[in-house]
Amino acid sequence: MSVSNSILPDDKSKQQFSCFRASAEFIQIPHFTDGPDDYRLVHGNVATLSQDVPVNHAWIEEIDFVYELSEGHKILFSKDDYYKKNKIINVRTYTAQEAITLIGEYGHWGPWN
């Protein structure tokens, strides 16, 4: 998949938390879409964030690692530490292709369901 095949919602897409956009853009980088299928876009709930929404955070996972990309951060965590520290629940994972498809279908960065 080339960069030209990446999906970018138009300006009319609904406003989302920065983590959803950052993670969705990251998963569309050709290295991740054309390379090994080890990367996942993940949506879930972080205990320290607002629980007024069904899904309140997004990040990237690569096997046993988490990439935290919100608010301009690019921080690497072990998956176990990240889940324990942030009390992660309600997890939904997407391959790069699934994420690209859902961005196109919904017209925004997520969450989708």
Image (tube, rainbow, N blue to C red):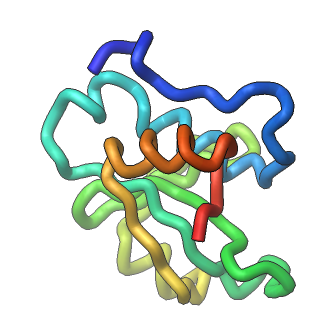
Q: Please name the residue shown 26% across and 66% down the image.
A: 64
Residue furthest out toward the left: 36
Instruction: Give the farthest residue toward the front.
Output: 105
Eyeballing the image, is 51 above or below 104?
Answer: below
Give percent across and percent down for residue 21: 66, 42
Quarter in which the C terminus is drawn: bottom right
Question: Between 59 and 34, which is closer to the camera in this rendering?
Answer: 34
Residue 111: x and y, percent?
Answer: 64, 62
Q: Is 2 left, or right, of 82 in this rendering?
A: left
Looking at the image, residue 66 lies above or below residue 39? below
Q: Dividing the picture into quarters, in which one does residue 9 lie?
A: top right
Query: Vertically, is 30 above or below 14?
Result: above
Q: How many marks?
A: 0
* 66 up-or-down from 32: above or below: below
What percent of the width, then of the height, locates residue 11?
A: 82, 27
Q: Quadrant of residue 105?
A: top right
Whether residue 66 sits left or right of residue 25 in the image: it is left
Please tell me which residue is depicted at 36% across the width and 67% down the height of the picture.
78
Position in image of residue 30 (x %, y %): 32, 22
Q: Is residue 83 rendered to the left or right of residue 97? A: right
**In the displayed structure image, the side of residue 72 where residue 69 appears, left or right:** left
Q: Quadrant of residue 54?
A: bottom right
Q: Residue at x 32, y 14 (%)?
A: 2
Quarter of the image containing the N terminus?
A: top left
What residue do we see at 79% from left, 79% from top?
53
